[in-house]
Image (cartoon, grey):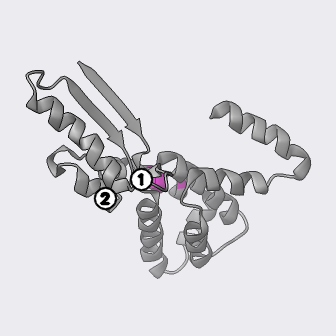
Amino acid sequence: KICMIIDGLDELEEPQESLWRLCSQVNSWTSQAGSSSHNDHLKLLISSREELPIIKAFPSANILILHTLTEPDIKALVETTLESNQFYQALVGKPQSFERQSQELQDLIVMHAEGVFLWVVLLLKWMEEELATGTSFQALQNVVHEAPVELDDFFEKILGAIARQHQPGAWFVFAMLM
């Protein structure tokens, strides 16, 4: 019996191969394995973003959409982090309409997170820096909208904000973590 794990199927960078064709081929491996006398000898565990060719290539009964499962935990993290911040409390404590804006901001963060906890943690740290400047809800929403979607791009943005003389050391730490 074999279990094959494929991470990042959506990251195909092969110009001669379409994502649909690759997914169909990978899916056929289990179909072929299931049709032989060696039924259920091959299992696939594939992680990917929800790209249409990927979703269409695999049976919907076998798809688990992780960010729908992690959403309550991400909501809790966002709410706890923001509401424990003294600057955020002061911002929300202003006119009554700000409670609605607070909820809209938290919902925006959860929606943009797409189930990625590390992205949320990085964003919240960035937002806490913004909150310390005496910001507005509009500025916080801009932080969410301007945040890089890809973690690699987020790391580059963070490292770009580090003083030039400290960047090599910071890159070394990130390289060790990766």
Whether tag 1 and tag 2 are in contact, CB under 8 A, the answer is no
Residue 49 seen in this snapshot: yes
Q: Earlier in the sequence, mark 1 or mark 2?
A: 1
Residue at 41%, 63% in the rendered image: 111
Residue at 20%, 35% in the rendered image: 30
Q: Which residue is mark 2?
A: 53
The kind of residue tagged 2 is: Pro
Q: Position of residue 135 (x, y in %)?
A: 66, 73
Residue 69 seen in this snapshot: no
Which label sits on residue 131? none
Q: Position of residue 147 (x, y in %)?
A: 59, 63
Q: Bounds of the magenta span?
A: 77-81
Describe the element under mark 2 as helix, strand or loop. Answer: helix
Residue 118 highlighted magenta (yes or no): no
Mark 2 neighbour class, 10 Å CA radius: few under 14, some 14 to 19, many 20 or more: some
Which label sits on residue 17? 1
Instruction: Report the side of 84 relative to 55 (left or right).
Output: right
Q: Foreground: 126 or 4? A: 4
